[in-house]
Amino acid sequence: MFGYDEVAEFVQREKPAVVAFVHAETSTGALQDPRPITKAARELDALTIADAVTSLGGVPVSVDEMDIDIAYSCSQKGLSCPPGLAPFTASRRAVERLNARKTPVPEWYLDLRLLGEYFDGHKYHHTASATLFYALHESLRLIHEEGLENRFARHRRAHHALLQGFEELGLRMHVAEGYRIPHLNTPRVPEGVDDLKVRKHLLEKDGIEIAGGFGPLAGKIFRIGMMGPMANEECVKMFLGRFGEALQAAA
């Protein structure tokens, strides 16, 4: 995890116009506090861009409070609706910086100025999927009905229940306490266990799909999402039972 001193040293040395970071890193299960990064970036007048793909809907993403200029996410993870939409937000500061830009932006898809004109109804850019917006609206309605704080607390309870179950199974977590994504858990693969066999057993026998590690973490961690409607005591209990059986079968 990046602390203020480390980020400040980097931005003072490199003097970037934009500092981008991942809020909830799905390949490791680590949750980054944005404030050390945004504080250091602001001191250099750099914009900040936060990847909130996994965090939105599962943990607070307080862009104003955290001084995040641009944040983007997806519809299928913490918001728990079909994939295909990419919600994003831009601060007034970021929009002003964008409008003052003199050099052209060649990428059609990533041209925020062009997208802004489309969202304001002044220029055509693409044809959005109406059904996806209906799905997103329903997801947001359910989140509003539950209440954000209740939703975040429910994900934390599911997370702690999983941690207790992992401990009883003899598993250690990859990420230190206090830096974990509550709805994307990464227990380490026990010594002598083939993670591919565990995941195959779960998928073929129980219809449960979990992911493995990437790159240097391949074969060393499991990546277990427990988010949205699945973040509840019944799902956690069911999963832990099936997971325990799969670990025994693969040992």
Image: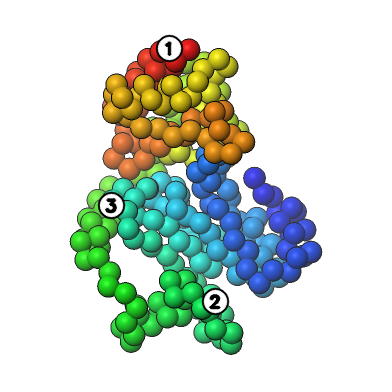
Name the N-terminal-most of marks 3 and 2. Answer: 3
Provide the secondary structure element on which disc 2 rests: helix
In the image, what residue type sits under mark 1? Gln
In the image, what residue type sits under mark 3? Pro
State the residue at coordinates (54%, 28%): 219
Query: Where is mark 1, residue-wise?
Result: 248
Query: Where is mark 3, residue-wise?
Result: 82
Whether label 1 touches label 2, CB < 8 Å: no
Scheme of colours in the image: rainbow
x, y percent for residue 193: 51, 17
Provide the secondary structure element on which disc 3 rests: loop
Quick one: label 3, few (<14), some, or many (20+) residues within 10 Å? some
Name the N-terminal-most of marks 1 and 2. Answer: 2
State the residue at coordinates (75%, 53%): 5
**Is label 3 or label 2 in front?**
3
**Label of residue 93 in the image:** 2
Quick one: label 1, few (<14), some, or many (20+) residues within 10 Å? few
Mark 3 and mark 2: Cα distance apart in space: 31 Å
